[in-house]
Image: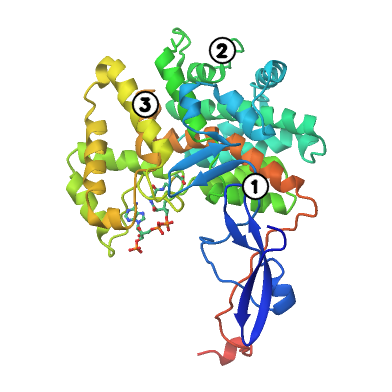
Amino acid sequence: MADEKAILTFEGKQIELPVIRGTEGDVAVDISRLYNENKIMTYDPSLASTAVCKSTITYIDGDKGILRYRGIPIEQFVTERPNFIEVAHLLLTGHLPNKEEGVSFRQRLTDNELLHENIRYHFRNMPTAAPPMAQLSASLNNLACFHREFLVLDNDDDFMEVSARLISKIRTIAAFIYRRSQGLPYNYPNPNLRYCANFLHMMFSLPFAQYEVSQEIEDALNLVLILHADHEQNCSAATVRTVASSRANLFASCAAGICALWGPLHGGANVEVMEMLDGIYRGGLTPEECIRMAKDRENRFRLFGFGHRVYKNYDPRAKILRAACDKVFEKMKNRQNDPELNIARRLEELALADPYFIERKLYPNVDFYSGLLLRAMGIPTNMFTVMFAMGRLPGWIAQWKEQHDLSGGRIIRPRQVYMGPNETDYVPFEGRD
Ligand code: CMC
């Protein structure tokens, strides 16, 4: 609707504000000129009602539990079984790669899977027990030192090249972080393997025994990465865009995204979920106690892997991962009747029947079942959030590009309502109480 307006009435004055409607019916009142023209701010501390951009990448309908990448429902990535690289291309460019584009993108990934040998020294100087997310973020920033020709991007070919470098190298970096933590020699990437199989090889092959990648595990990893690939304006994507808005380079912006993802309310929740399940399994806690603690306002404990800012329905990614756990565990002889999967199901059953969770519309999110799958692949808990970052990287890059390409894009710079002391005089040291 052309020239649709909302009216804000304040202090006897009527202010007309333009209305924006999204292609799926989202409605937003454009207040971007409100302060400059009227000296009025809006207050929304956790941005729960604020759209910070127009985006064409990912669509979520939180009430219906819908998630689409570039218009494609997430469920179709399960039935059609594309690989993670095709989905990355989709997010970066807006379309699935045709044959030629697919070959070219894959070749770029293969050509860039090695790390500069000097990056090994960067790892060597970190304690072996350093948190993997700290190492990952530092390593991504470090890549800027080795790929300086991409600090300023002004054409699409360079963008695809640097995107391929990042998506390829984050996999090598993640495997190196794990190998170091175990005191194991690094495995160089194998250009004959596909993205996920190559990662599993770098993680688990031994000098005397090549890791045999089973199809189920490769498929499960591919699925996990696809399901994490983008999620519109979450905390880390918003961080990437904020950093990008200062015209910071792609490496720095994605490194900042990794730091935001690390937190337990965001990507770090997958670690918390597994620690909770382990705690229950070892007998320190019962599922009933977890639910009681999560409901207690005096207790900082939360039911990790539950709840979402946007989803007020079952997170569609959790639904897919739950089914994938059932399928993978069924096929793995030593995982049938897995006690921790049973505990997770019990927690879900208790929560979904509890008025606290029902009233607040709290359902399992992506982190509730992902850790169980990752553990079945042999990935240790402290690497879970690194896996999330590997999956999310194409989304961050796509978000960075959208922000970077905004014509006349302004730096993201929120305002505040100052509540501190009024003007007061400096007191020299001798005069202080
Ligand atoms: N356990 C207990 N209570 C909860 C939980 C939970 N997991 N999540 C939300 N609540 C409560 C919350 O305290 C609030 O209660 P009240 O109305 O009495 O104040 C109510 O439910 C509504 O919360 P909300 O406004 O929907 O939550 P939010 O948007 O501020 O936070 C969240 C969203 C994901 C940070 C939160 O649900 C949470 O902390 N969940 C656990 C951590 C987690 O699993 N994070 C992963 C999110 S999905 C993947 C990702 O983003 O990385």
Closer to the eye: label 1 or 3? 1
Q: Secondary structure at mark 1?
A: loop
Q: Position of residue 66 (x, y in %)?
A: 47, 41
Q: Which residue is mark 3?
A: 324
At x 65% / y 53%, what residue is drawn?
53
Rendered residue at 63%/57% (across/down) = 52
Question: The residue under label 2 is which amino acid type?
Answer: Leu
Q: Is residue 270 left or right of residue 11?
A: left
Query: Vertically, is 14 above or below 242?
Result: below
Query: Residue 101 occupies which quadrant of the picture?
Result: top right
Tell me the SS state at disc 3: helix
Looking at the image, which is closer to me, 279 or 54? 54
Disc 2 residue crowd, few under 14, some 14–19, many 20+, Cα 10 Å: some
Q: How many marks?
A: 3
The residues tagged by marks 1 and 3 sit, at their Cα atoms, a distance apart of 30 Å
Residue drawn at the location 63% of the way across and 37% of the way down: 140
Q: Visible in this render: residue 255?
A: yes
Where residue 117 appears, x then y in whole percent? 66, 24
Neighbour class for label 1 at 10 Å: few (<14), some, many (≥20)?
some
- Among the two numbered marks 2 and 1 on one chain, the one whose residue lies closer to the N terminus: 1
- Circle 1 residue: 55
Residue at which label 2 appears: 193
Mark 2 residue's CB less than 8 Å from ligand 1: no
Q: Where in the image, quadrant-wise, is ligand 1 located?
A: bottom left
Tell me the amino acid under the disc marked 1.
Ser
Q: Position of residue 425 (x, y in %)?
A: 63, 90
